[in-house]
Image (tube, rainbow, N blue to C red):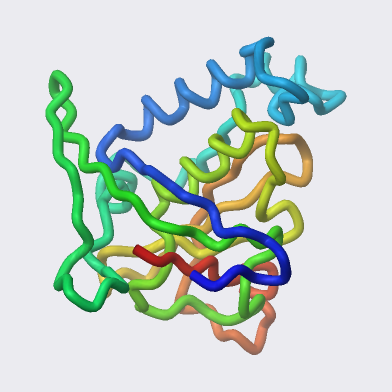
């Protein structure tokens, strides 16, 4: 991936297959981790109120059921490497979890590209797990946070689905938010004006 406007792409090593509850647990643990420098997950004035409401670091829209999450929690098969037909993965079994690791470069721009463009079934989208990994890795590294002013589409593996996920930093509180967009809405209504594309290479 070409470096964009002086911003280096992010190297994202992502574990697909962890499940929704494990990601929520990661968000909670990172929010309460006092060893993380300048932890943005615990900087908001309403942090204590938010914790009481059981929102720790990661907010997942209630409409994302376990079945929907399971569908989204998949590694992409797309690769930009000319000599390969599919993206290389490393699979490992941890108890009941079948984890599939991928390594790709994700755009490091604060704001996604092509803001306002409706979701298209293109494989260049980051996966939901890559988006989560990228966000939480930046927190751990005290790095620059992406998607604070807009959201980024994530891959919808089911090409027949009428919904697609996107990820962003919450405006009400400092937490990572995962939501769904209805793809049946016309672009003329500016429904997608706050969502863009965060391309991946790998």
The C terminus: image quadrant: bottom left
How far across and down, in percent of the image, does residue 131 sit? 48, 50
Q: Relative to 130, is 44 on the left or the right?
A: right
Q: Nearer the viewer, residue 167 or 102?
A: 102
Residue drawn at x 42%, y 80% is 120
Residue drawn at x 37%, y 34% is 20
Q: Quadrant of residue 141?
A: top right
Q: Height in image: 9 above or below 14?
A: below
How far across and down, in percent of the image, does residue 31 sit? 63, 20
Q: Height in image: 162 above or below 154?
A: below
How far across and down, in percent of the image, does residue 114 sit? 62, 80
Q: Height in image: 48 above or below 122?
A: above
Q: Nearer the viewer, residue 4 or 189?
A: 4
How far across and down, in percent of the image, does residue 10 sit? 53, 52
Residue drawn at x 24%, y 78% is 82
* Number of residue marks: 0
Q: Relative to 18, is 108 on the left or the right?
A: right
Outermost residue on the right side: it is: 45
Q: Quadrant of residue 139?
A: top right
Residue drawn at x 49%, y 59% is 106
Q: Relative to 200, is 112 on the left or the right?
A: right
Q: Height in image: 198 above or below 60?
A: below
Q: Nearer the viewer, residue 145 or 170?
A: 145
Q: Quadrant of residue 174?
A: top right
């Amino acid at each position: 991936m070409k470096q964009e406007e002086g911003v280096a792409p992010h190297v994202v090593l992502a574990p697909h297959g962890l499940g929704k509850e494990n990601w929520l647990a990661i968000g909670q643990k990172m929010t309460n981790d006092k060893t993380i420098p300048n932890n943005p997950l615990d900087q908001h004035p309403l942090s204590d109120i938010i914790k009481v409401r059981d929102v720790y670091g990661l907010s997942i829209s209630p409409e994302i059921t376990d079945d929907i999450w399971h569908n989204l929690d998949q590694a992409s098969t797309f690769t930009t490497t000319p000599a390969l037909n599919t993206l290389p993965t490393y699979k490992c079994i941890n108890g009941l979890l079948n984890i599939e690791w991928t390594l790709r470069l994700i755009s490091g721009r604060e704001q996604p590209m092509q803001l306002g463009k409706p979701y298209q079934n293109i494989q260049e989208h980051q996966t939901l797990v890559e988006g989560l990994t990228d966000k939480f890795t930046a927190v751990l590294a005290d790095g620059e946070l992406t998607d604070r002013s807009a959201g980024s589409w994530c891959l919808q593996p089911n090409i027949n689905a009428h919904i697609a996920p996107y990820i962003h930093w919450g405006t009400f509180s400092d937490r990572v938010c995962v939501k769904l967009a209805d793809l049946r809405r016309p672009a003329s209504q500016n429904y997608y004006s706050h969502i863009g594309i965060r391309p991946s290479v790998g």
